[in-house]
Image: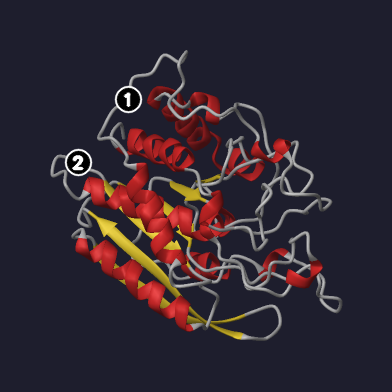
Amino acid sequence: MVSMVAIAVISFSCASCRNVSKSSGSDSTAVASPTGPAFYADSAYSFTAAQCNFGPRTMNSEAHEKCGEWIIGKFRSYGLTVTTQKADLKGYDGTILKSTNIIASYNPDASTRILICAHWDSRPWADNDPDSLNHKTPVMAANDGASGVAVMLELARLVSKDSTLSIGVDFVCFDAEDWGVPTWEENIEDSEGSWALGSKHFADNLPEGYEARYGILLDMVGGEGAKFYREGLSSQFARTIVDKVWSAAKAAGYGSYFPDDEGGYVTDDHVPLNKTANIPTIDIIPYYPQCPQSSFGMTWHTTDDTMEHIDRNTLKVVGQTLIQIIYTE
């Protein structure tokens, strides 16, 4: 997950960083009309864990390379057409990042397409950790990276079993998202340009003739107590898509997890898709307005972004909402 100012450091026991009630199911009072197959949270949870089993997937690492091969293999095992965009991208510090965007297409011949995306690399530095001794320790990125890919893999598994869908879906795993300027860097000022390098490369180098009706970015979609407010840039660039997704959440029975309130403005992978690729794209990203550790939640860019803080219910909420969208398009 990319730039937005982190706030003061406190203990991770803070209840306000969990944001919501202990509910483990759909809204009891919502008038729901769910469509499509059941999204299996246990499956998405296992996909999240499988990525973490490689270790932090930081750029240019062996874990990163092996996990990328695993992601490609999983999408192919579900019959999707997989292509990659490989590029040498320059990090803020001059490091050459061996980047691979992974594009997995369901129903590749369909003319009507939607794009669902997430980043798959790990933050190299836990620079928002309460313990400053951890600020140069790599992040496991169970939530901030692996959870979004895991939801996409489970969606791919489910739609691959259905021959009745006429829509095409492109699942895009962006690389080199989280190499942005760390807070401990004294000589270089943070800037939007240091983040989301893989999605910028994708937007600058779209596959020939590629068009998508709209895009949905999944960022940190497995955290404890998450609620997904309407992110500001999403409303600015693609309000009709925000309305569509929030309506789908209500129809799926999870409207309370998608408040109609506005959250923050986040520089994320959806920005180049909107600005450069002209694909109206929104960001499904949690917002914890009462959490002093960070409005992104207590584990953001810390060594505690591990499987212990992944919530199956959050994965279910987001995954079932995406199923609702795919099956009503």
Q: Amino acid at mark 2?
A: Leu
Front disc: 2 or 1: 1
List the residue tagged with mark 1: 34
- Judge the density around disc 1: few (<14), some (14-19), many (≥20) Cα neighbours within 10 Å: many
**Against 284, is 153 above or below?**
below
The answer to whether residue 175 is left or right of residue 163 is right
Residue 165 shows which numbered tag? 2
How far apart are labels 2 and 1 at the CA level? 16 Å
Sooner in the amino-acid sequence: mark 2 or mark 1 = 1
Quadrant of the rendering where the C terminus is positioned: top left
* Residue 101 located left or right of residue 199: left
**Res 130 quadrant in image:** bottom right
Quadrant, the N terminus: bottom right
Indicate the secondary structure of the residue bearing disc 1.
loop
Residue at the (27%, 69%) spot, across then down: 73
**The quarter of the displayed image where residue 90 is located:** bottom right
Is 21 displayed left or right of 37 in the figure?
right
Q: Is disc 2 placed on a helix, strand or loop?
A: loop
Colour setting = secondary structure
Q: Amino acid at mark 1?
A: Pro
Give the image location of residue 267, x and y in percent. 66, 55
Judge the density around disc 2: few (<14), some (14-19), many (≥20) Cα neighbours within 10 Å: some
Residue that appears at 37% across and 57% down: 47
**Viewer-proximal residue, 83 or 111?**
83
